[in-house]
Amino acid sequence: MTDKTELERILEYGISGVPQIKADEKRVWLGEFRERVILGLTMEQAVMVEAFSVVKRFLKDPKSEILIVNNNIPMDIVRNYMVLAREMDKEYKSMATDAKDAMGLVIVSRSAVQYENVLVDIEPIPDKFKNLTNKDLCGDCYDELVELNPDIAKEYKRIGFFGKLIGIPCNSCEK
């Protein structure tokens, strides 16, 4: 039996720090236990335009309390998540990590929630709807977007009769 002496344990703690409970799990979930996670997005998903509406929907969950973003995400995207967390009255944190398998963004509770499916699929929208400076769309483009992603479509508006009359163009197809 190789019991470590008290001195050996103290030296080990001094060199490598206090042992972490479920350290691998916490590395993946940005410092949180998996049982507290409500939503987890990979790095690739967290930078997608479509992810913003998904995050907003999950922040409405009454158990969601903290939005944690990986520091490796570009600052312009992080800023949008910070503003969203403030608007939804949720705590915001960013986590610096070099772990390759770390999530890009997680929404967590302060207590265990044990949600089964915290990883979601995010369907990309066509490029013609990305990076539009104005959110006015013709009827055809708006209907196409509603069919593809109703959550994203809520951020856009259909050009009405009066808009067509004064010549407001569709920002997607230029009609």
Image (cartoon, rainbow, N blue to C red):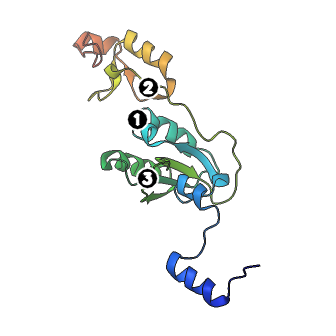
Residue at 60 percent of width and 72 percent of height:
19
Q: Position of residue 144 (x, y in %)?
A: 43, 13
Numbered mark located on residue 58 in the image: none
**Element type where label 3 sits in the image:** strand
Give the residue number, with chain letter if any, for mark 2. Answer: 124
Q: Residue furthest bottom?
A: 7
> Of marks 3 and 1, which one's residue comes earlier in the chain?
1
Query: Tag on residue 70?
Result: 3
On the image, which quarter does residue 130 sit in? top left
Q: Quadrant of the N terminus?
A: bottom right
* Residue displayed at 38% across by 23% down: 157
19 vs 82, nearest the viewer? 19
Looking at the rendered structure, the kind of residue marked 2 is Pro
Mark 1 = which residue?
48
Contact between labelled residues 1 and 3, with CB atoms less than 8 Å apart: no
Report, in whole angstroms, how far the alpha carbon at label 3 lies from the one at label 1: 14 Å
Q: CA distance from mark 2 to mark 3?
A: 21 Å
